[in-house]
Image (cartoon, grey):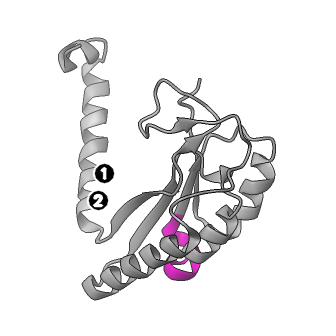
Amino acid sequence: MQYKDFYSGVSEEQMDMLKTHLKSRFEFRKSKREFGIVFDILHQCDLNCRGCGTNALFTYEKSVDVVTPTITDINNVFVKIKAYADEKGVPVFVNIGGGEPFLRKDIIEILESASKHFGSSGVGVDTNGTLDNSFDLILEALPYVSYVGISINGL
């Protein structure tokens, strides 16, 4: 499909609104001196979505015991990211992803560590929200994150 086909049903007024919005977003992003990192801490998932862009490995398990990177590896990465951000004088936003990050038994510990390094406003997490305990885990994660993304790839 060509982009012209995609926009063929859009009125001129809607197109102007879209252009205005995109221009303001671009100007905002250009003025904002920060960088964002998506850190995939797990490559297993309890879903097998066709639209998934992470190539996650499907698992029937509702938690994963043996994981890489380890919590030590993850903390070492946080230290390096923080040092780089401090050296460059820019804030950082670290979005924790996967697979399904909440399959990790140490996910809250990971989010707490990220929050200590970057502040809760500098941390987010993505989830599909389908685990039996997802709601409770998200509530437990809230003090450490400013963003929880719920993926709808499986719909």
Does residue 47 lie above or below 63 as drawn?
Answer: above
Amino acid bearing label 1 = Arg
Q: Residue furthest front?
A: 66
Image vertical order of residue 153 relative to residue 40, above or below:
above
Which span is picked out in magenta?
115-123
Tag 2 near tag 1, CB within 8 Å: yes
Residue for badge 2 = 29
Say which residue appears at 44% left-offset and 37% top-offset. 55
Question: Which residue lies at the image location 51% right of the left edge and 46% below the top edge?
Answer: 43
Tell me the quarter of the picture where residue 67 sits: bottom right
- Please determine whether, in this image, residue 152 is positioned above or below residue 32: above
- The residue nearer to you, when weighing 38 against 149, is 38
Is 15 situated left or right of 66 in this image? left
Does residue 42 appear to the left or right of 138 in the view shown?
A: left
Q: Helix, strand, or loop for circle 2? A: helix
Look at label 2 and name its amino acid. Answer: Arg
User: Helix or strand or loop: what does disc 1 sit on?
Assistant: helix
Q: Which residue is mark 1?
A: 25
Image quadrant occupied by the C terminus: top right
